[in-house]
Image: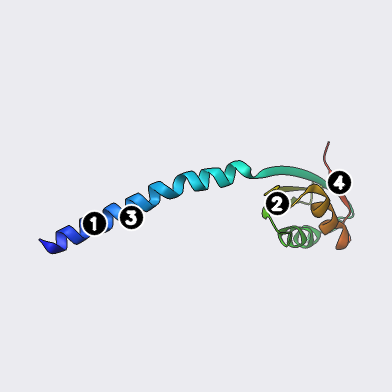
Amino acid sequence: MIRKLLLSLIFLLSFASLALSVPVLAGESAQMKVVTLDVQNMTCAMCPYTVKKSLTKVPGVEKAEVDYDSKTAKITYDPSKADIAALTEATTNVGYPSQLRQ
């Protein structure tokens, strides 16, 4: 009887913590912004790795996808922690100047 009660309590607490965390997660993703940068000087298949590494080191960057064929970087970031200038500076500092795609 006590075991069933404890298991029920654990289940309810787990469910309650999950339910409480959902609005926080939704709020966090609502704050994120996605931009695309045009990236110069990518001449080989290794270049995107260097660009991605530089972008993911910028505080606030959640995700960076760099495409060699289109010479672009798609970045998901928190605008309260990073801005376009920080993103373009990060790529420029490793030899790949970039600018916001129009």
- Which of disc 3 and disc 4 is earlier in sequence? 3
Q: CA distance from mark 3 to mark 2?
A: 34 Å
Mark toward the viewer: 1 or 4 = 1
Cα distance in 3D space between marks 4 and 3: 45 Å
Foreground mark, 1 or 2, reads 1
Q: Residue furthest left?
A: 1
Q: Amino acid at mark 3?
A: Ser
- Please state which of the two labelled residues, at mark 4 or mark 3, is closer to the viewer: 3
- Counting the numbered discs, the total is 4
Q: Are marks 3 and 2 in contact (CB under 8 Å)?
A: no
Q: Which residue is mark 4?
A: 99
Q: Residue 86's image quarter? A: bottom right
Residue wearing tag 3: 14
* Residue under label 1: 9
Residue type (three-letter) at the residue carrying disc 2? Glu
Label 2 packing within 10 angstroms: few (<14), some (14-19), many (20+): some
At horizontal 68% and vertical 55% (from top left) the residue drawn is: 60
Helix, strand or loop at disc 2? strand
Of the two numbered discs 3 and 2 on the same chain, state the one appearing first in sequence. Answer: 3
Amino acid at circle 1: Leu
- Give the residue number, with chain letter if any, for mark 2: 65
Q: Are the residues flagged by discs 4 and 3 in contact, CB closer than 8 Å?
A: no
